[in-house]
Amino acid sequence: MTGERAGTQGESSSVHRSSFRVHIFPFCAFVAAFFSVFGWIVFGGKSVAGGDVFFYTYPLRAAAWRMIRAGELPLWTPHVLSGFPLLAMPQLALGYPLTWGHFFLRPHAAEQVFIFAPFLLAPAFTYFYARETGRSRTASVLAGLTFAYGGWMTNVFGMSGLPTNPTMWLPLFLVAVERARTRPFARCLLGAAAAYTMSVLTGYGQGFLYVGVIAVAYALFVSLFASRPREETANGRRETSDWSRWRPLGTAAGSVVLAAGVGAFQMLETLRAQRRSVRGALTYDFFVEGAFTPSAAFKSFAAPLYHFIEVTTNVAPLAFLLAFVALASAVYARAITRREPVEADAGATSAALAADVRIFFWAALAALSFALMLGDATPLNRWLFRVPVLNLFRRPSRHAFEWAFALAVLAAYGWDIVNAHARERLRTRRAGARAWAFIAAATALLGAGAWAASAWCGASFELPYVGESVPAAEAAYVRWKLAFTLCVVAALAASLGVAARRARGAFLACVVLLATLAEPYILVRHWWAGTLKDAARLDTPSLSTRLLQSLPPEANRVYVRANSATEEHALAPRFDALDLTALHGLHNVGGYEQLFPARYARALGEVDYDGVTPRAGVGRSVALFGPRSTVLDLLNATHVVTYAHLGVTPEQSSPAGRDAAIDTPLDPTRWQTTASFDGVVVLRNLRAQPRAWLVAEAESVDGEEALRRISGESGREFDPRRTALLEVAPAELPALPGGEVAPGAAARVVEYGSSRVVIET
């Protein structure tokens, strides 16, 4: 795959003129890497569906695409939160082409396309970017596999597909930025806009925001330090006002504007929902929640199986060493060539490669992202918290994205620098000298590395896993990792000494694949195995859902006030938690949503994103079930699924976990037990109002008073069957007769669609 000389900037144009055959071997390597790591899942007959996939994206995407197939615009869903704008759920990515498989595939199969596609596309896109900067094919493959199988993607967060899909478009965006230096501006602008639009359409705001910021910063850096104007001034100084110099920046900035225009249909709806949600503003403590300590960051790199926060700092150790080589070489080259710069040419000497200023950009980004991952250990996050928009996204550990990508690119530079240096030494060595010795050594060391990888994998499944404080297990994991790394580094050194072009390329290709895939395979086998499910588990309703499916959903809402991870893998689940009820057609008062409406959360008892668990710092309460609360009555919640004793988790419903308030008996004139099984009850609300009704009275209130009245906390009687509370000035109240409505007066919902509700009175 790589006996070729290290690439150069001058070589890049010939790379693009070459036939597709040049890229066949790299693409075959990416496919082989994918099946090496994920083949046991792909051919195992099960689907990856755990956590957010199982409870959020999978059911709501299925419900939304069911609407689309029925000819409805996916503007509104009645299935969660008593109704919510679908376009304000951007992470469903309804406009993103990789979710369109839902149109013709079964939902769980379409979800697999969304989850697995980044592991085929991210290495290919990274490969193309590395080639655009003049890196050799093998170095570009190394960059692609390092990023795609590093600590950002192969982890418990990446298995949802939410962070991986938007970030995989960054290298393709950068390809267009690079080409803007020498190619037609309009074509590059459209290419960059297309790549960034794909990132935006995924709907994962934190991901596409970071992609845009990095791309614009990179374009600015290239324009300032790496672009050459067509002409120089008379005194030999570069003319910074030349448009050709600033075309990369113009391409990046213009594409961000164009992509924002295309994605406005969901971004504007999301911003409206965000201002009214529990995420309307973040506290600093919440902003830095989920950061690595310096010690944890190091351990996450050395033993990611035992130390992670959704993501890890881990990349292939060989790639990390090569990244360090690239930076050290660049610093050295900068020092010795300050007076007489070394230009990269077809010869591509190691010194010329090290002179590429892009190395400093990616090194700076790696250092910055690592510092940001440390949360309060550095002052950077306190400064970032003051930046609008950027301060809306929490978990500093997610800067592992920039860390992994920057190291991947640096590793490609380091590979070519080492390779070029080895070639320079080969030219001075007598032909045929020790040729067979190097081939034999490379073969033996690759075999030793493969054996170490196999033994490491076998040992990792015998060692105690995460959650168990067993230092000896971690130490054993690190010892195997160190032994494997030493074999790989030695194999690389021996392979670089092989003079025969084809043999050298084959050995180096094996080194890259072995170095980048061994640990990801171990991690994926541990982390992803627990999310696998049979199709029957994904399609079968729970016991309580089957009971409630007899109700007409357009006239009766349910409230699933229970949440437990144990139901995810139960063969006969008692209830469908969070958004799973949408998959089976129920209209739920609850549900899971990051932009959970703040006032709605308060009305349900200061609940968090899941509509069930109280927010941090708020105690449990059953006031929602008390005789004075009319919240569930107003929301047409005819049935409630909850734990016995009204607990919101199994721990809180146990005798040891409940308190006196939860032991208060329910009013039998309002609540009737419909079913009870294994600690879960289905309650019928005898006071639930219909979906629409008529009243003859209205009162003027503000938002706080309205909340107190419907919650029963104001001390004043409120009967929703007689009175409507309106947040208007008293003078704006409609003229109503008051008292009871006329006999026979009624309201009936005759149509409830995604963009149209018809009520007949």
Image (cartoon, helix red, strand yellow):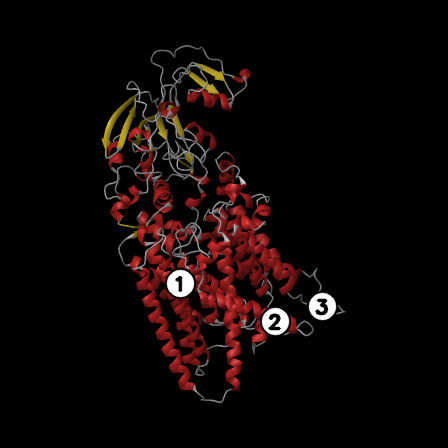
Q: Is residue 187 visible?
A: no
Q: Find disc 3 in the rendering and name its residue.
A: 232
Q: Which label sits in the foreground, 2 or 1?
A: 1
Residue at the image point whose x is 35% and y is 45% from the top: 58
Give coordinates of residue 757: x percent, y percent. 40, 29
Q: Find disc 1 in the rendering and name its residue.
A: 478
Crowd class of label 2 (few under 14; some 14 to 19; many from 20; radius 10 Å) = some
Decide which of tag 3 and tag 2 comes sooner along the chain: 3
> What is the residue that sits farthest to the right in this orientation?
235
Give coordinates of residue 603: x percent, y percent. 43, 27
Cα distance between the residues tagged 3 and 2? 28 Å
Picture quadrant where residue 682 is located: top left
Relative to 356, does residue 83 appear above or below in the rendering? above
Which amino acid type corresponds to the residue marked 1 in the rendered image?
Val
Q: Secondary structure at mark 3?
A: loop
Q: Which label sits in the foreground, 3 or 1?
A: 1
Q: Nearer the viewer, residue 89 or 562?
A: 562
Q: Which label sits in the foreground, 3 or 2?
A: 2
Decide which of tag 2 and tag 1 comes sooner along the chain: 2
Q: Find disc 2 in the rendering and name its residue.
A: 332
Which amino acid type corresponds to the residue marked 2 in the rendered image?
Tyr
